[in-house]
Image (cartoon, helix red, strand yellow):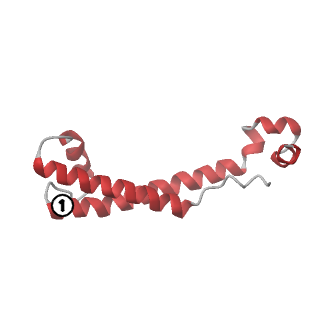
Amino acid sequence: MHKCSGRLCAGGLGLAMGLVWGVMMLVMGIIAMNGDYGKLFFDMMASMYPGYAATLGGSLIGLVWGFIDGFIGGFLIATIYNFVCGRCCKCFCKCCEKGSCETKAASE
């Protein structure tokens, strides 16, 4: 086992988070068409996503903006995680007491 075995796929996490956030924006737009539930959240997101409104078309625009926003967020999280994971043995892990992550993995 080498020290990079815990890496995340940046594209995969970006896609997953983009889909979740995009669908959530779509659902919140549809809910906003039919009532006041989550109105403060909806209004806040509508101020950040141009075209996002409490209509079917606006909800679809929210789906696109949400996907883009979620994808970028997920991609950045995975990239930062992979960067930190690559430096794990230099500052964070208890495995450093034995010299390296490879040494600990080989001894288990």
Instruction: Please identify the quarter of the rendering in which residue 8 is found.
Output: bottom right
Q: Which residue, as the protein is rendered here, is positioned at the far front?
A: 108
Instruction: Please identify the quarter of the rendering in which residue 91 is found.
Output: top right
Q: Which residue is drawn at 14% across and 54% down?
A: 54
Q: Residue at x 65, y 52 (%)?
A: 83
The residue nearer to you, when weighing 18 against 69, is: 18
Task: Tell how many labels.
Answer: 1
Left of 16 or right of it: where is 58?
left
Give the position of the N terminus as an image quadrant.
bottom right
Left of 89 or right of it: where is 44?
left
Q: Which residue, as the protein is rendered here, is positioned at the far left?
A: 34
Specify the amino acid type for callout 1. Answer: Gly
Q: Which residue is drawn at 76% across and 52% down?
A: 3
Q: Residue at x 11, y 44 (%)?
A: 35
The residue nearer to you, when weighing 54 against 50, is: 54
Left of 46 or right of it: where is 97?
right
Residue 23 place in picture, x, y as percent: 31, 57
Residue 87 place in picture, x, y as percent: 72, 48
Q: Residues within 10 Å of mark 1 (few under 14, many from 20)?
A: many
Left of 102 or right of it: where is 73?
left
- Name the residue carrying label 1: 58
Q: In this view, does 97 lie above or below 7?
A: above
Q: Is residue 85 above or below residue 22?
A: above
Residue 76 place in picture, x, y as percent: 52, 55
| Badge 1 element | helix
Give the position of the C terminus as an image quadrant.
top right
